[in-house]
Each structure stands twice: as structure tokens, then as C-alpha cells.
Amino acid sequence: MDNRIKTFLFLAILTAIVLFIGSLFGKNGLVLAAIIVVAMNLISYFFSDRIVLAMYRAKPASKKDYSRLHSIVEELANKAKIPKPKIYIIPTKMENAFATGRNPENGVVAVTEGIMKSLDEKELRGVLAHELNHIKHRDILIATIASVFAGIIMFLANMARFAVIFGGGNDENRGNIIGLILIGILAPIAALLIQMAISRSREYMADEDAAKLIKNGEPLASALLKLEKGPKVRSGAETTAHLFIVNPLSTKGIAGLFSTHPPVDERVKRLRALKF
């Protein structure tokens, strides 16, 4: 199934879950949840680029010191028909990269010092093409929408748990304690799994479109294999892991179910199966 269709279906499922749980608490419960979560995510949407760049102490990449990097990004941006994004360097040995910005006009690409040293030019082009496609397809906006729905579901699930603890808000709730317990436990898990599935579908799409942009899937496949073997961080990147081209956190075992990224082996397999 096409990844664009998958994204639409996942968002539709999130919407259905919100409407179903909200109906249990009436109009006021749903409206309150929506106002709080939408407000929080709007702030994140408009200021997330500044926040994440500050978190990683990213600095603007000067044209003097990174002339080749600027040249590659400009060339790929022209091919993708988007404005050239701002370019930042993250001072760390971790081998990774990410894109941010609420739209193509405010796009940002950040690469680590580690990735600049570990990849050859063809591999770096593949990575940058991937990140530029995230910007082109407004994946930050898609992620924000998914977060809004997931956040509302979490809020309503908490309300369900409180309704159980304090005897329910009305006779109908008190008569459906088992249903409220199940909603309080299962709804947040379902919302998180769907949110992660949306993120993974966007990664697959960015991989495929990056390969099409440079007319070769092998450079990005080779880069992903190198980056997967690179050093991981133990903690501190949970809230921003979805931004990076490979997950900066270890996702072995059950943690893989909640990973924002598809398995690298599967991504490489798909890239190498593309024909040009």
C-alpha cells in the first residue's frame, strides 16, 4: 500500500478513536482535551526548530568552512523544487542528521560532525536528499497533526482512569467501569502505536523519494548501514528521536514496536529493489 494512503488511514483511525472516547464524556470533555492539546502542539509546531537546534547546540554551517555541503544542499533543493533550507552543524561524534521547520520556506537541515566524517560524498547526498524530502512533504506538519490526535487520546484516557478512581462522572460511566478501565489502558497504547506507524511510513516515503531525486537508491542504502552501526545515545533523545534519519536510541527487543523508524535492513532492502 502506498505510504501516503497509509498516513491518511492512520490519521483517520486516530480521529475515530478520539471521537469514540470523547463521546463517552460528552461534548465538554472532548472540547477541553482538544483546546489544551492543540495549544501545546501549536507552540511546538512554530518553535520546535529553534528548540531542537538549541537542544543539540547546533551552529549555522558557514559557506567558508562547509562550501561543499552548501553546494550539495543547494543542488538537491533545486531538483526538489523547494527553497534552499538553512544548514546547521551539530558538534557531536554521533553519526546522524535531521530536518525540521514547519514548511519548505522555513526548512532546516542539521548534520552532525560525525556524519560528515563517516560518509563519502555520494552517501551524504543520499542522506541530504532524504532530509530535503521530509521538508518538501511537510512531514513536520504531519507529525504535529498526529501528535495532536495522540495527545487528545492520552488526555481522554486519563479522564477515563480518573472516572474509574472517583466513581465516574455520571451514572452511565459508573455502569461501565470495565469499559473505562480498558479505554484508560489500551487507548494510549493504540494511539502511540499508530503515531509510530505514521512516522515509519513517512520514513519509507522519504527514502524512496530521495532515491528518485538522485536516481540511485544505493548511496542512501549504504549510508543507512553505516549509520546503524554508529554510536547510540542511552537517553536524552526520546522526544526528538523521530527527527533523525536513523533512530539515535537503541530499539532492540520490544522497544522496536514503539520505534519511530522502520528497521534499517528493511529500508535498505526497499531502496535496493528500486529500479531507475
Image (spheres, rainbow, N blue to C red):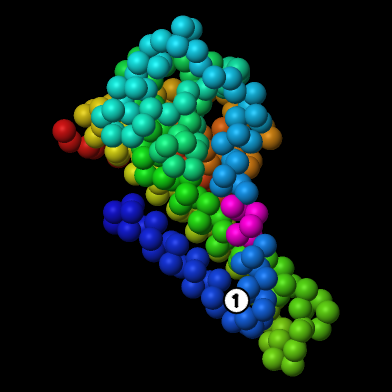
Magenta highlight range: 37-42
Visible in this render: residue 269? no
Query: What x and y, as percent, mark residue 178?
Result: 69, 82
Q: Quadrant of residue 166?
A: bottom right
How many numbered discs? 1
215 with respect to 53 (left or right): left
Is label 1 in a helix, a strand or a loop?
Answer: helix
Identify the residue at horizontal 52%, vertical 22% (top origin): 88
200 with respect to 3 (left or right): right
Q: Is residue 102 depicted above or below 127 in this figure?
A: below
Question: Could you tell me the amino acid type at mark 1?
Answer: Ile
Visible in this render: residue 122? yes
Query: What x and y, as percent, mark residue 49?
Result: 56, 36
Identify the residue at horizontal 50%, vertical 38% (top origin): 101
Q: Is residue 238 depicted above or below 29 in this figure?
A: above
Q: Is residue 200 magenta?
A: no
Give the main secondary structure, helix, strand or loop, of the magenta stretch: helix
What residue is pinned by disc 1?
21
